[in-house]
Image (spheres, helix red, strand yellow):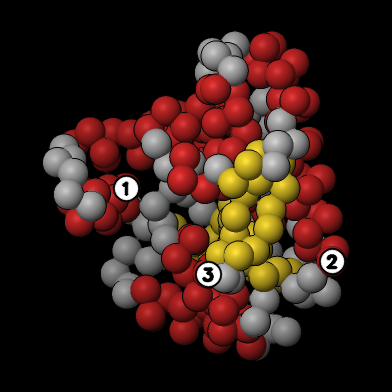
């Protein structure tokens, strides 16, 4: 089996790029952030505080998370329910960022991620794919962009949806999530020693996709 690991901070364009790369290669795209978000939704629905690691550790065993593919899209199932429509809210983002620091949460989801990669060729995106989940991945990419660029992309995305975002708030949230993801004790976000760094700040989606496909073709 071939595994492509794509890691990096929120808003670097991982999911957009990983989806396109997977499609080109006819590999399965696995969005691991969506799994952490489904777990976060479960905790939120059960009234668990995002700051109570003990309760999160106890409660996470009640969430059965699996993934399925419908019309080529990854669908996350939480205890059998398709929860895709509920994964992108502010509360879920906040809870996912905090609960993903709890070891019991990671153990459950990392196991599922490894099973998926053992069964099929995958492009998997997340924070710890190249460092922890699939250390033997044939290609590892660390995708990043400046906080300013990532905040601007998110700002435009929200405006497009008809919302009225405040740029400074988005930039502060992104910086805050970076800090939490990079400084947590378990599986912090960092570039694997053998990962290729791709800074997307001044690149279009098409340029990044082609660049990464070139890296993959030279190695696989
Ligand atoms: O990529 P995302 O924004 O959907 O991820 C949601 C949260 O899950 C984010 O705060 C970091 C965490 N996450 C993680 O800890 N490990 C992963 N492999 C993927 C996501």
Identify the residue position indicated by label 3 in the image. 19
Identify the residue position indicated by label 1 in the image. 147
Which is more foreground, mark 3 or mark 1?
3
- Residue at 33% x, 73% y is 203
Where in the figure is residue 77, as x and y percent of width and height? 65, 46
Where in the figure is residue 196, as x and y percent of width and height? 58, 68
The image quadrant of residue 188 is: top right
For the residue pair 214 and 45, the one nearer the viewer reads as 45
Give the left or right position of residue 94, taking residue 165 as reference: right
- Residue at 32% x, 63% y is 201
Residue 46 higher or lower than 90, as above or below: above
User: What SS does tag 1 mark?
Assistant: helix
Q: Residues within 10 Å of mark 3 (few under 14, many from 20)?
A: many
Where in the figure is residue 154, as x and y percent of width and height? 28, 50
Give the left or right position of residue 67, taking residue 73 as reference: right
Q: Residues within 10 Å of mark 1 (few under 14, many from 20)?
A: many
User: What SS does tag 3 mark?
Assistant: helix
Give the left or right position of residue 201, taking residue 211 as reference: left
């Amino acid at each position: 089996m071939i595994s492509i690991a794509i890691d990096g901070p929120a808003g670097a364009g991982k999911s957009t790029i990983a989806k396109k790369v997977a499609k080109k290669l006819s590999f399965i795209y696995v969005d691991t952030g969506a799994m952490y978000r489904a777990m976060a939704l479960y905790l939120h629905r059960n009234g668990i505080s995002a700051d109570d690691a003990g309760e999160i550790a106890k409660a996470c065993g009640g969430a059965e998370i699996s993934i399925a593919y419908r019309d080529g899209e990854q669908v996350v199932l939480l205890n059998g329910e398709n929860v895709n429509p509920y994964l992108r809210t502010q509360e879920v983002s906040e809870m996912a960022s905090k609960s993903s620091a709890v070891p019991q949460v990671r153990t459950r989801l990392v196991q599922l991620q490894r099973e998926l990669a053992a069964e099929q060729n995958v492009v998997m995106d997340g924070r710890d794919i190249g460092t922890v989940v699939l250390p033997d991945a044939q290609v590892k990419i660390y995708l990043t962009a400046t906080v300013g660029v990532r905040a601007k992309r998110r700002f435009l995305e929200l405006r497009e949806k008809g919302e009225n975002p405040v740029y400074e708030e988005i930039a502060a949230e992104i910086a805050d999530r970076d800090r939490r993801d990079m400084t947590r004790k378990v599986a912090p976000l960092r570039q694997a020693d053998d990962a290729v760094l791709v800074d997307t700040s001044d690149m279009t989606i098409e340029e990044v996709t082609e660049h990464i496909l070139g890296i993959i073709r030279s190695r696989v």
